[in-house]
Amino acid sequence: MKKYINWGVIGLGNAAKAFSSGFNNLTNSKLLAVASKNEEKRLFFKEKFNLKKEYLYENYEDLINNKDLDIVYVALPHSMHKKWCLKLANAKKNILVEKPAATSLDDISEIINLVKLNNVFLTEGISFRFHSFVNQILSATKKFNINDIYSIESNFGNDAIGGKKIFGLRFKKPDKKKRLFNPNLAGGAIWDGGCYPLSLVRLIISNLNEKKFIKPKIKQIKKFIGTTGVDENSELVLEFGKILSTIKTSINSNLQNNLIIKLKNGKIIVNNPWNPSRNSSIDLMFNNQVETIPCLNTENVYKSEIETISNLLLKNVIELKYPLPDLNDIKENIEFLEKWSKG
């Protein structure tokens, strides 16, 4: 019986570096091979993760053809996800694709159809969904009835431009060469970070609705388009029955990076749900009482992601179950990201 899963990584940018840090001290997983057009990046991974020279590939397809690999993590720019997911599915390789898995409903539908046809595993790298803190959030919010909720606010955003501001003015300009600010690489706040708050809001409401996802109505879309042509700040207001949810994302401002549920007699604040750590907690404020629930598992979020997926593959499980992101969940999230981006 197989005891561990061999992983490969295509694309060795910052996402791949962060993700690969999760392999430290894992017994069910091993980073075996990487592929990048950039030799410097390949050598960095060789030294950092003690890889063998023969498992460093310049050509992505050479990595895909490595018969020792059980799963490949696609960490390329958003605009390249579809092409390489399709190639991996045709090669019958299991797939973890960085978020967003695709940038249109048509593209993710095509990927999912081919994955099902070839009977391979696919999931999306919304890493917090694989961490046990999500179960704490769902347990805490389940204490309340869905009819007790007025609204949900959720946001994810960081300043990716950098540079000092003087009297509120920033002189440093966004660099179109960077993926986040390049419209040709599907850059922008919505596609980069919008998936996080959207995913969690949908998950919480489904949990309160007997684990059934509710398709919301779009009430409002706001976007600020920057000088490079991508959205730098965006807002989406959804209506889940009587519950209004405001979702914000940004690549030019540091947001609170939290989730707030407003109740009839109080509120719930989830602090730092996107990268669970010692700074993550759930504050229950109800009937003038305050209870703080700390994050019980402060291990690397990518470690949880890799370990969870590897355990499933060792058991030959290729279909994820709630609350993990299954294929339909991924598809619906991308459907609303696309509507948001085009609105």
Image (cartoon, rainbow, N blue to C red):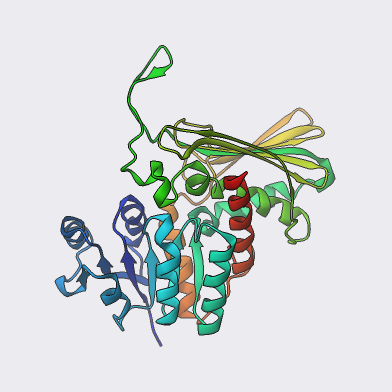
Q: Quadrant of the N terminus?
A: bottom left
Residue 98 in picture, x, y percent from top left = 44, 59
Q: Quadrant of the C terminus?
A: top right
Horizontal side, residue 283 vs residue 280: left or right: right
Quadrant location of residue 113? bottom right
Quadrant location of residue 180? top left
Foreground of the two, 102 or 151: 102
Quadrant location of residue 135? bottom right
Q: Is residue 169 above or below residue 83?
A: above
Residue 23 in picture, x, y percent from top left = 34, 62
At x 44% / y 53%, what residue is drawn? 301
Q: Residue lying furthest top in this view? A: 167
Residue 278 in picture, x, y percent from top left = 47, 41
Residue 284 in view in this figure: no
Q: Is residue 304 above or below residue 141?
A: below
Residue 203 in view in this figure: yes
At x 52% / y 59%, what residue is drawn? 130
Horizontal side, residue 105 vs residue 211: left or right: left
At x 45% / y 38%, what residue is drawn? 229
Residue 199 in picture, x, y percent from top left = 60, 52
Callout count: 0
Foreground of the two, 5 or 231: 231
Q: Residue lying furthest bottom in this view? A: 1
Foreground of the two, 51 or 140: 51
